[in-house]
Image: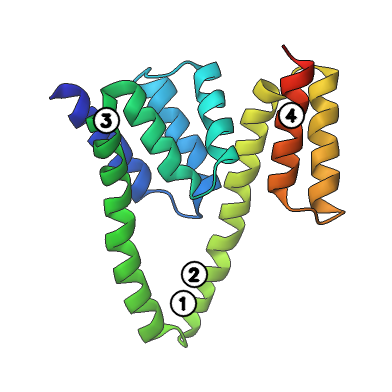
């Protein structure tokens, strides 16, 4: 029962403090899975993150499932996913009710205006932490730069860059 309890505690925390959506949670999950519990190595975490980004759906739930499955099998996946979703489900019900009731109050606008930059900062922290682990040679830097240009400037859907980069890796990194 110890491993399941650890998964529940860990993913309840990530679900509780994951303000800002999926990408903002990545550093929290990394701290729990790699640093606190040592369930994954840094490379394994990067691989889970890459796989979770390549699949459709919310990244945090996919990471909870992958890590839970790796650590505790199918029941570990259930424990991690349930624990991760529970706080956000409860909080979104409370927050939505409060927001729609008090959304016209100036202090509510102030809170939202103050929190938005934090989300951007957390995303930048994620990029700063993951970039050295994912972009470690000139060719991977070029792949990242090309994908950025294609998605940001050419407005191509990210899934096409993920598929193209995966195919590139399949044929050129054997």
Depth check, front residue: 165 or 89: 165
- What residue does disc 4 label? 167
Q: Nearer the viewer, mark 3 or mark 1?
A: 3
Rendering coords of residue 29 (x, y %): 43, 34
Q: Nearer the viewer, mark 2 or mark 3?
A: 3
Residue at x 58%, y 62% (from the top left corner): 116
In the rendered structure, find residue 111 and report the number of the disc placed on it: 2
On screen, residue 68 versus residue 172, left or right, reads: left
Position of 82 relative to 73 (above/below): below
Which numbered disc flags the more N-terminal residue, 4 or 1? Answer: 1
In the rendered structure, find residue 74 and report the number of the disc placed on it: 3
Rendering coords of residue 45 (x, y %): 50, 24
Which numbered disc flags the more N-terminal residue, 3 or 1? Answer: 3
Q: Quadrant of the N terminus?
A: top left
Depth check, front residue: 133 or 164: 164
In the rendered structure, find residue 108 and report the number of the disc placed on it: 1
Residue at x 44%, y 40% (from the top left corner): 62
Q: For residue 89, what is the image quadrant? A: bottom left
Check disc 1: other Cα within 10 Å, few if <14, some if 14-19, many if 20+: some
């Amino acid at each position: 029962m110890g491993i399941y309890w650890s998964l529940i505690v860990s993913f309840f925390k990530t679900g509780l403090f994951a303000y800002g959506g999926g990408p903002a949670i990545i550093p929290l999950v990394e701290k729990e899975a790699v640093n606190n519990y040592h369930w994954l190595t840094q490379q394994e975490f990067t691989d889970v993150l890459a796989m979770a980004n390549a699949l459709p759906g919310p990244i945090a739930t996919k990471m909870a499932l992958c890590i839970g499955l790796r650590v505790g099998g199918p029941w570990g996946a259930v424990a991690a996913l349930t624990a991760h979703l529970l706080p956000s489900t409860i909080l979104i019900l409370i927050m939505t009710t409060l927001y729609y009731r008090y959304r016209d109050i100036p202090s509510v606008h102030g809170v939202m205006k103050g929190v938005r930059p934090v989300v951007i900062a957390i995303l930048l922290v994620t990029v700063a932490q993951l970039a050295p682990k994912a972009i470690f040679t000139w060719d991977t830097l070029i792949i990242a730069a090309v994908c950025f240009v294609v998605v940001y400037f050419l407005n191509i859907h990210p899934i096409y860059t993920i598929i193209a980069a995966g195919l590139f890796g399949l044929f050129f990194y054997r």
